[in-house]
Image (cartoon, rainbow, N blue to C red):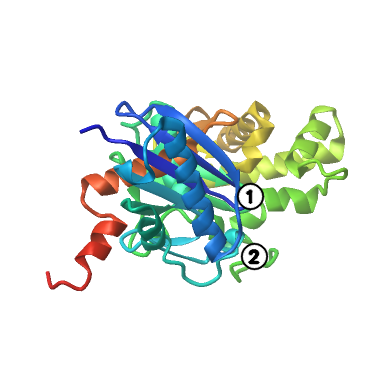
């Protein structure tokens, strides 16, 4: 029996979905705008899967398993999502069971950054490495892959380093604390320090101005890079991951971001023989612009859970039957 696995990455503005073949290569993909709100999110996911099915000429229910990556707190076992603010889902949403019911396929839901970490490992050929994926977008968060598996932790909070406070006098964060790393190293932080005109993304505007020699832009960019470097250091010092992959919306500026972060890591190591030994500049990399890591990772999360028998349909089939 051929396995057909789909991955759907549902973001605040777009849904990207892929089909993986047996060799885990992408054989079909779909891109849709996201409908916001609980019903909109379910509908967007279902529509993406129907379009994928059409592309490869199968029925939606022919998929072996569907993995879905979404922002917010995800309870992987039940497929429930909460605090997905970017998707207009404030309360809890039974995304896995609802999609599974509508499509007639097993659905596995994973946090989008954790899924992207799996996707990055696969796409960069680093399946055997311990790896952290650092998502620098609206917020800042990391996904950790160790021994080929996503690390979630006791409450799913593993990798939420954006909310490590580094300045008790700093700006108030959306989490309620002050001076979180996220308030210094995120797309939102760039937008606050470098408000772009004419609708250009602030990060693109900042990096272009800095490259053109604008002194204030250089300062803002280098301060930002210093804080991203702090996040990289934090990940290596807590988990000693072999590779830290930079991803998220801000990486659309391209290789200039990696260059600045590497320079910042070199500056920080210059006065510390301890840090120098750890070779941080050599351990950081960036995802290629336009890669479908989130969707690929969602598919791999689905496949991993399916293989271990932990999917939404299976859960709902089991119902309240005593163990
Ligand atoms: Zn915070």
Find residue 267 and report its horizontal and vertical position in percent. Answer: 62, 34
What whole-number distance in Å separates the C-alpha atoms at marks 2 and 1?
23 Å
Q: Is residue 119 above or below residue 176?
A: above
Find residue 314 and report its horizontal and vertical position in percent. Answer: 24, 58
Asked which secondary structure carries label 1, the reply is: loop
In this view, the residue in front, 115 or 92, is 92
Quadrant of the snapshot with the N terminus: top left
Q: Is mark 2 within 8 Å of ligand 1?
A: yes
Locate ligand 1 by image quadrant.
Answer: bottom right
Residue at left offset 33%, top offset 53%: 104
Find residue 168 and report its horizontal and vertical position in percent. Answer: 63, 66
In this view, the residue in front, 257 or 66, is 66
In this view, the residue in front, 90 or 120, is 90
Return the residue at label 1: 13
Quadrant of the snapshot with the C terminus: bottom left
Return the residue at label 2: 173
Q: Is residue 105 visible?
A: yes
Find residue 121 and report its horizontal and vertical position in percent. Answer: 40, 34
Residue at left offset 61%, top offset 71%: 176
Q: Is residue 43 above or below residue 62?
A: below
Asked which secondary structure carries label 2, the reply is: loop
């Amino acid at each position: 029996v051929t396995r057909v696995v789909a991955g759907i990455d549902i973001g605040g503005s777009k849904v990207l979905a892929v089909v993986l073949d047996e060799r885990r290569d992408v054989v079909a993909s779909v891109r849709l705008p996201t409908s916001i709100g609980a019903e909109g999110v379910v509908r967007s996911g279902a529509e993406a899967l129907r379009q994928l099915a059409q592309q490869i000429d199968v029925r939606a229910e022919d998929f072996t398993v569907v993995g879905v990556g979404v922002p917010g707190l995800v309870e992987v076992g039940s497929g429930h999502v909460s605090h997905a603010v970017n998707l207009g889902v404030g309360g809890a949403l039974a995304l896995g069971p609802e999609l599974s019911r509508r499509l007639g396929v097993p659905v596995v839901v994973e946090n989008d950054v954790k899924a992207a970490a799996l996707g990055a490992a696969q796409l960069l050929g680093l399946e055997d490495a311990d790896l952290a994926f650092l998502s620098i977008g609206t917020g800042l968060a990391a996904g950790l892959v160790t021994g080929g598996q996503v690390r979630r932790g006791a409450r799913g909070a593993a990798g939420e380093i954006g909310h490590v406070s580094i300045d008790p006098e700093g700006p108030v964060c959306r989490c309620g604390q002050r001076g979180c790393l996220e308030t210094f190293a995120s797309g939102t932080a760039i937008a606050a320090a470098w408000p772009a005109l004419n609708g250009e993304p602030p990060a693109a505007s900042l990096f272009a101005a800095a490259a053109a020699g604008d002194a204030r832009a250089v300062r803002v960019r280098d301060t930002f890079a210093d804080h991203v470097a702090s996040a990289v250091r934090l990940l290596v010092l807590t988990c000693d991951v072999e590779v830290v992959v930079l991803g998220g919306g801000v990486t659309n500026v391209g290789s200039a971001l990696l260059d600045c972060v590497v320079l910042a890591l070199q500056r920080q190591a210059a006065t510390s023989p301890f840090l120098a030994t750890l070779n941080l500049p050599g351990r950081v990399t960036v995802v290629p612009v336009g890669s479908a890591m989130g969707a690929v990772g969602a598919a791999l999360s689905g496949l991993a859970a399916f293989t271990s028998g932990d999917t939404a349909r299976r859960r709902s089939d089991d119902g309240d039957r005593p163990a």
